[in-house]
Amino acid sequence: MFKTRRLSQIAFLVYGLTALAPANSYAQATDTQEGAQSPAPPPLPGTVTPPPGKTEAGPGQPIEDKRAFGVLPNYKTAEENAVFRPLTVKQKFTIATKDSFDYPVLLTTAFFAGISQLEGSDNQVYHQGVEGFAHRYAIEYADQTMGNYFPEAIAPTIFHDDPRYFRKAEGPVHSRLLYALSRMFVCKNNAGEWTFNSPEIVGNIMAAEFTQSYHPHQRTQGDVISEAGNFWESDVAGNIIKEFWPDVKRHFQHHTNGAPLAGSAAGL
């Protein structure tokens, strides 16, 4: 989503997250068993109980955390084994709004705008100094917002698709990694069936086309494809973070609590 992101950065992210993730799903099962203190209380009268092996998840609500690493919005993550409930149009726009205006986004936007200024990119347009930083900040934030609303709300509404990332959450690391990458091209529709990911592919092209209206020095179709590529790269990284962040969190919790980490990625 930002001009400074490169495929090499994504490759580094992949290596770091998968190195910290357990090699298989047994670690997750062990955590669940160890953390169980007592049987769950019986459901209240009138409560709908999910089928065996399923969990209940509110539409558009993340299972683990609202923010990965405490700063990256994580509002469109759902579990693949959860009971599927379609999102309304309002819920799709709510996800995009939370991803765009959650307060840590203000800080991450400043970080990448600062990198852009240090690198001196587009100095002929934005210049340096406070004014140059403010201009870069505004452009980066606008790009990020468009890169959220089109693939997460507008395009899913048009194509009747679900913008959420459904975590696989179990299996070998390499299998989960391939799954995360493949979700760039596959998504669920409003009926819960897997289909071509039009919101991701078409939605990001729509976002890139729209951003050209306030990029005075980037008006060619090549610029549109380049900007769409930035959005796609960002979403690739986002899928990987959504898939492995809970494993990374458990890794640090184990070390914080002095417990040994169950499983490793050494078998890759």
Image: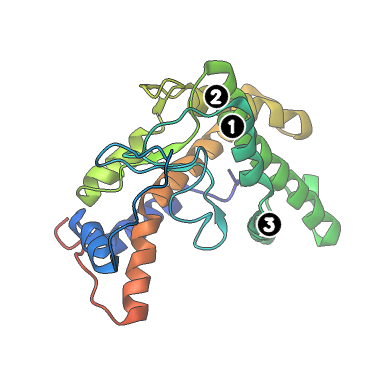
Instruction: Check disc 2 and report its element: helix, strand or loop.
Output: helix
Residue 222 visible at all: no
Question: Looking at the image, is mark 2 or mark 1 nearer the viewer?
Answer: 1
**Is 148 in front, or is 233?**
148
Precedes in sequence: disc 1 or disc 3: 1
- Mark 1 packing: few (<14 Cα in 10 Å), some, or many (20+)? many
Q: Which mark is residue 182?
A: none
Rounded to the nearest angstrom, the CA distance separating label 2 from label 1 is 8 Å
Rounded to the nearest angstrom, the CA distance separating label 3 from label 2 is 25 Å
Which residue position holds label 2?
Answer: 156
**Amino acid type of the residue that numbered disc 2 sits on in the rendered structure:** Pro
The residue positioned 56% from the left and 30% from the top of the image is: 151
Q: Is residue 67 above or below residue 250?
A: above
**Amino acid type of the residue that numbered disc 3 sits on in the rendered structure:** Tyr
- Mark 2 packing: few (<14 Cα in 10 Å), some, or many (20+)? many
Q: Are marks 2 and 1 in contact (CB under 8 Å)?
A: yes
Which residue position holds label 3?
Answer: 103
**Is 2 in front, or is 71?**
71
Q: Quadrant of the N terminus?
A: top right
- Residue 74 locus on image (x, y percent): 52, 49
The residue positioned 70% from the left and 56% from the top of the image is: 106
Q: Which mark is residue 92?
A: 1
Q: Is residue 226 above or below residue 128?
A: above
Residue 202 visible at all: yes
**Residue closest to the far right:** 131
Q: Are marks 1 and 3 in contact (CB under 8 Å)?
A: no
**Is 79 in front, or is 7?**
79
- Residue 97 locus on image (x, y percent): 66, 41
Q: Quadrant of residue 267?
A: bottom left
Instruction: Check disc 1 and report its element: helix, strand or loop.
Output: helix
